[in-house]
């Protein structure tokens, strides 16, 4: 395990919080980002100027027991850091990891390295990356399946209906974005998510491509408000009897969805071309 002296204080705090929550085996760092927010109080000079740093970590968390509610897990960690460090976690049990390592897993072969390890009670030996034309065929088939489903949901939004339900429209757009994210994760990481939540998927994808920037909220209040509605579209459809989403907002999100799918298609096809070349000849490292 890397000593806490080599980690930033915020990441070390996250590790300690996770250790208190679950029977932890190991944690691997997939990606991280830092955002600095500056505040200036013009009408009240006594408050002065202030800067706040917010951190985001994408983590592979391996535990001895199954984590049944990733959303609660991530929210608890975020709250216990004083809302300073946000985590986006991928969860596996140790038994699941051992099974996947025995049978080969290209996602784990890249993540389970000493460079990514930030906490480990027992060293895991990753399998080598598997190259084979059949492997490429599986990746491409999954990509096409997910993208076709993403376009299916998007096309349903484009249909003109006699009945207007903007909340339901937002749900269809949300589903389209989720499927596109799943296709990206499959192509770039060869990872199939077990937890589908739009904000989680977009932030995982932001570790390796630029398309999530189209959908992730900007600085404006409207952007943040609409993004919140988009991420909670399933809840709004199920539990709200009043449709409080405006046509303007759903049209705005629909335009974002079109741009996002176009960008995803370009980035994914480019990655597929790279994969095809490396899988063309059979070899196992």
Image (cartoon, rainbow, N blue to C red):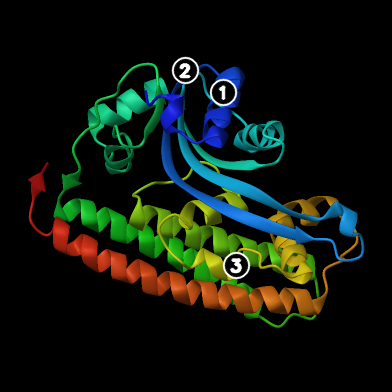
Determine the CA span between mark 1 and mark 2: 17 Å
Q: Residue at x 51, y 51 (%)?
A: 33
Q: Nearer the viewer, residue 55 or 97?
A: 55
Q: Is residue 23 above or below residue 274?
A: above
* Residue 192 circle label: none
Determine the CA span between mark 1 and mark 3: 32 Å
Whichever of callouts 1 and 3 sits on the residue coming sooner in the sequence is: 1
Q: Which mark lies nearer to you, 1 or 2?
A: 1
Which residue matches tag 2? 64
Quadrant including the C terminus: top left
Quadrant including the N terminus: top left
Q: Is residue 41 above or below residue 55?
A: below
Q: Residues within 10 Å of mark 1 (few under 14, many from 20)?
A: few
Determine the CA span between mark 3 and mark 2: 35 Å
Q: Residues within 10 Å of mark 2 (few under 14, many from 20)?
A: some
**x and y, in percent, of residue 243 in the image:** 86, 65
> Answer yes or no: do the residues labelled 1 and 3 have beta carbons within 8 Å?
no
* Residue 16 circle label: 1
Q: Residue at x 69, y 53 (%)?
A: 51
Q: Is residue 282 above or below residue 5?
A: below
| Visible residue check, residue 194 | yes
Q: Secondary structure at mark 1?
A: helix
Q: Secondary structure at mark 3?
A: helix
**x and y, in percent, of residue 109 in the image:** 27, 38
**Quadrant location of residue 163?**
bottom right
Q: Residue at x 36, y 67 (%)?
A: 268
Which residue matches tag 3? 215
């Amino acid at each position: 395990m890397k000593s806490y002296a080599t980690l930033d204080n915020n990441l070390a705090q996250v590790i300690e919080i996770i250790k208190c929550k679950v029977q932890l085996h190991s944690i691997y760092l997939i990606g991280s980002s830092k955002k600095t927010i500056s505040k200036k109080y013009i009408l009240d000079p006594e408050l002065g100027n202030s800067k706040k740093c917010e951190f985001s970590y994408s983590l592979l968390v391996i535990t001895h027991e199954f984590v049944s509610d990733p959303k609660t897990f991530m929210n608890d960690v975020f709250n216990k850091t004083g809302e300073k460090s946000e985590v986006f976690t991928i969860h596996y049990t140790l038994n699941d990891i051992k099974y996947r390592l025995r049978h080969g897993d290209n996602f784990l072969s890249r993540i389970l390295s000493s460079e990514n390890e930030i906490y480990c009670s027992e060293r895991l030996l990753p399998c080598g990356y598997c190259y084979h034309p059949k492997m490429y065929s599986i990746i491409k088939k999954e990509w096409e399946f997910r993208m076709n489903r993403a376009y299916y949901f998007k096309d349903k939004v484009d249909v003109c209906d006699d009945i207007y339900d903007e909340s339901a429209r937002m749900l269809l757009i949300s589903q389209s974005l989720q499927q596109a994210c799943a296709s990206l994760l499959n192509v770039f990481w060869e990872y199939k998510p077990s937890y589908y939540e739009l904000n989680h998927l977009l932030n995982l994808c932001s570790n390796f491509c630029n398309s999530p920037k189209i959908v992730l909220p900007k600085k404006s209040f409207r952007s943040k408000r609409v993004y919140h509605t988009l991420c909670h579209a399933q809840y709004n459809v199920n539990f709200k009897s009043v449709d409080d989403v405006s046509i303007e907002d759903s049209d705005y999100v629909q335009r974002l969805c079109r741009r996002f799918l176009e960008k995803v298609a370009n980035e994914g096809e480019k990655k597929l071309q790279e994969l095809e070349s490396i899988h063309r000849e059979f070899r196992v490292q």
